[in-house]
Amino acid sequence: MEIYWDESLSTGVELLDKQHKEIIARINTLLTMTDEEKEQELDKLLRFFGGYVIDHFNAEESYMIKHKYPRYDEHKEEHMKFLKSYSSLKRLFDKEGATELIITATQNQAVDWLVKHIRHTDRDVADFLRERE
């Protein structure tokens, strides 16, 4: 269930695409590991999400503010929902460790949310930014 980068994921905004590729690479690393490796690496991935993804959201949001993106509040709300869901997974991981349920939930959340968010919500921002230039 790896994520393959293609034009449907490209926003055309170099910084955002670079960050998306890094997030996808980290998710793909987890997806291609053995179960034993996943248990060891899940903590690293969750810590990565806790830092890098927040930085990425901040970068996206600064573009939207700078260019007066009209659906900024909706987009930011999607980011907040992801972070809330991430926080729940992280708390569960901290309490129970890398159970199969947590590994699967992390993979599914990351893949499903990320691909949908990039292809729709982020592409909308990128289209708007291109129109403004």
Image (cartoon, rainbow, N blue to C red):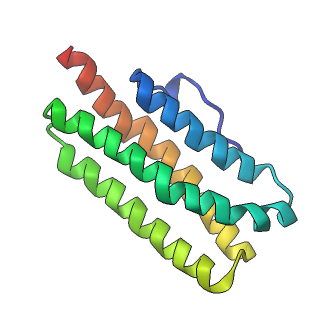
Look at the picture and state if 90 lies above or below 14. Answer: below
Q: Residue furthest top?
A: 133
The residue under the point 83% across, 61% down is 37
Tell me if I can see residue 69 in this picture. no
Q: Position of residue 102 (x, y in %)?
A: 65, 73
The residue under the point 60% across, 80% down is 94
Q: Nearer the viewer, residue 65 or 107?
A: 65
User: Which of the 4 image quarters holds residue 107?
Assistant: bottom right
Q: Nearer the viewer, residue 30 or 113?
A: 30
Q: Position of residue 66 (x, y in %)?
A: 17, 32
The residue under the point 23% across, 51% down is 74
Tell me if I can see residue 52 in this picture. yes
Q: Position of residue 71 (x, y in %)?
A: 18, 42
| In this picture, residue 119 sits left or right of residue 58 | right
| In this picture, residue 32 sits left or right of residue 20 | right
User: Which of the 4 image quarters holds residue 133?
Assistant: top left
| In this picture, residue 112 sits left or right of residue 71 | right
Look at the picture and state if 62 lies above or below 102. Answer: above
Q: Position of residue 106 (x, y in %)?
A: 61, 63
The residue under the point 57% across, 61% down is 47
